[in-house]
Amino acid sequence: TTLHATPPAAAPAGPHAVSGDSALAAEAARRRTFAVISHPDAGKSTLTEALALHAHAIGEAGAVHGKGNRRGVVSDWMDMEKDRGISITSAVLQFAYDGTVVNLLDTPGHADFSEDTYRVLAAVDAAVMLVDAAKGIEPQTFKLFEVCRARGVPVITVVNKWDRPGLDALAIMDELSTRIDLHPMPLTWPVGVAGDFHGVLDCATGDFVQFTRTPGGATEALAKRMSAAEAERLLGSVWTDAVEEYDLLRSSGHDYDHELFLSGAASPVLFGSAVLNFGVRQLLDTLVTLAPAPGARPDQAGTPRPVTAPFSGFVFKIQAGMDRAHRDRLAFVRVCSGQFTRGMVVTHAQTGRPFATKYAQSVFGRDRSTLDEAFPGDVIGLVNANALRVGDTLFAEEKVAFPRIPLFAPEHFAVARAAVTGKQKQFRRGIEQLGEEGVVQVLTSDRRGAQAPVLAAVGPMQFDVAKHRMEHEFGAPIRLETLGYSVARAVPAAVTSIVDSRPGAEALVREDGMHVAVFADKWRLASVEKDLPPGSLTPIFG
Ligand code: GDP
């Protein structure tokens, strides 16, 4: 794969220009942009493969996205990822399905990179929450779900791994209601307990959809639809038990309600097995029929920008070093309005400067191809986007700036110092860039000085990434000294000296100018808080 896609010498036919608001609105209306969130190992990579397979984006499951001995396109760009079998970076898989264009934004699996997932969630219109049938709601599911709720992202729930022993379906519904206050609205109901899976009851029609295992699971699972009477003849009590269970649930009000789904209060639920490709088609159909299309996005002032307005989009992810031969920097932009055509010159809202889009690309893992046009809901990758930062807006014609993406509250802190003398310039540049990309947050103070910035992270593995990149990409190896803080709060500039005067506490400044007070633990926080004017310390998102 070449890094800088060479634009064709003479553009052939060129992108088809969509003219008129209605054509543009129609393009937006057929987009479905979503991400899969889950606790590690719930089956996110497997489901991603299965979705792509069903949509015929790829020939055989396992070819697109994988870990371990499967060929990994997304997760192998960095040695670290390969070594640990984790995916750190995010990219986008786009495919056509049933007249719609589906954009699946990939998210890192490891909890340490949840801030990266969070930024992706700022760029989607819906999320698929994957729950392991044997484990129910796990810590990372919980945390990511909270982010969806905070952002008002509607969630579709998929109970995965139904092919093997697990919890009772009603117990899982109960977990959704009681543990995360998400009202479950099953669209399908499992026939046969976890581990003895025959298929699902289609809650809308009352039919039985029978799943048949296919060898290897690498091809689409066979799904045969039959009436309730046929199902009963075939399965006897296995069928009637499923119907009874579902009726029991229904009697307490679990029918599908679209408004409740869109508001984030309730979630449609599907059962399946990603590894056997069971229930994957139902998920695609649910995305097409129920998940919201891109809509008007509020700008910084809260004024919605209609999808038919001239081009606009915002950067939700910056990724560098994807190809070690060319140290490029790629900005992922979610299109919010208008038609994007490669080569158009747009304005960078934060600087007012023009930005040329000659090298726009679509990116999935290492595979990049030149992208000629994009519509609301799509994601474009812009090469050599050195001026762009996460949260920045690009627009054409009519000026707009979208709200910045809030930063998570860091829980890990370490002082970074250049390990090799004479590399101060590279050191400063590297740290600055890692901060702009959101690899780590960079906190500074006059006391510590520019030579010793504090790196702050949600998960400690972010430090490993920072260390690796400082050495291999910026040629400035660093030494990290862990600081014994674990809690951060926003604090007004006026009281930072009080914070600094107390043991186990310190005031720092974040790159966006926010003053941040950090504390050894919540008890230390409480003791300092008593000496500050009431309301001085405010939680940081996350
Ligand atoms: P991720 O960490 O969420 O991306 O999870 P993976 O997709 O890598 O899956 C973790 C493990 O669970 C792998 O060994 C998968 O083969 C397995 N797995 C995924 N989906 C299913 C499923 O539906 N049934 C069973 N039995 N195993 C599954």
Image: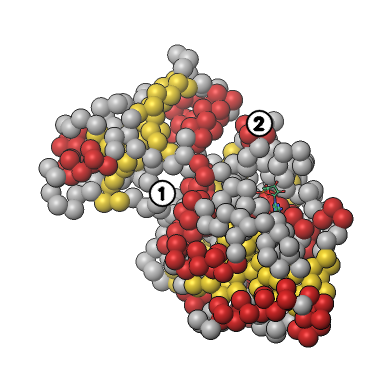
Measured along the vertical axis of the image, is residue 183 above or below residue 219?
below
Q: Which quadrant does the N terminus fall into?
A: top right
Number of dots carrying numbers: 2
Which residue is rendered at x = 86% and y = 59% of the image?
A: 214
**Element type at mark 2:** helix
Name the kind of residue labelled 1 in the image. Answer: Leu
Outermost residue on the top side: it is: 421
Q: Earlier in the sequence, mark 2 or mark 1?
A: 2
For residue 407, the mark is 1
Q: Report whether 376 appears left or right of 461.
A: right
For residue 83, the mark is 2
Measured along the vertical axis of the image, is residue 195 above or below residue 524?
below
- Confirm whether residue 370 shows in the render: no
Q: Picture quarter containing residue 94?
A: bottom right
In front of the other: label 2 or label 1?
Answer: 2
Which residue is rendered at x = 61% and y = 76% of the image?
A: 245
Q: Position of residue 377 (x, y in %)?
A: 60, 65
**Circle 2 Cα neighbour tier, 10 Å, few/some/many (<14 / 14–19 / ≥20):** few
Q: Position of residue 144 (x, y in %)?
A: 49, 55
Which residue is rendered at x = 24% and y = 46% of the image?
A: 491
Q: Report whether 105 appears left or right of 483.
A: right
**Element type at mark 1:** loop
Camera-side residue: 411 or 361?
411
Q: Position of residue 141 (x, y in %)?
A: 52, 55
Which residue is rendered at x = 47% and y = 35% of the image?
A: 460
Measured along the vertical axis of the image, is residue 113 above or below residue 372?
above
- Confirm whether residue 198 shows in the render: yes
* Residue at mark 2 to residue at mark 1: CA–CA distance: 28 Å
Q: Report whether 27 appears left or right of 462.
A: right
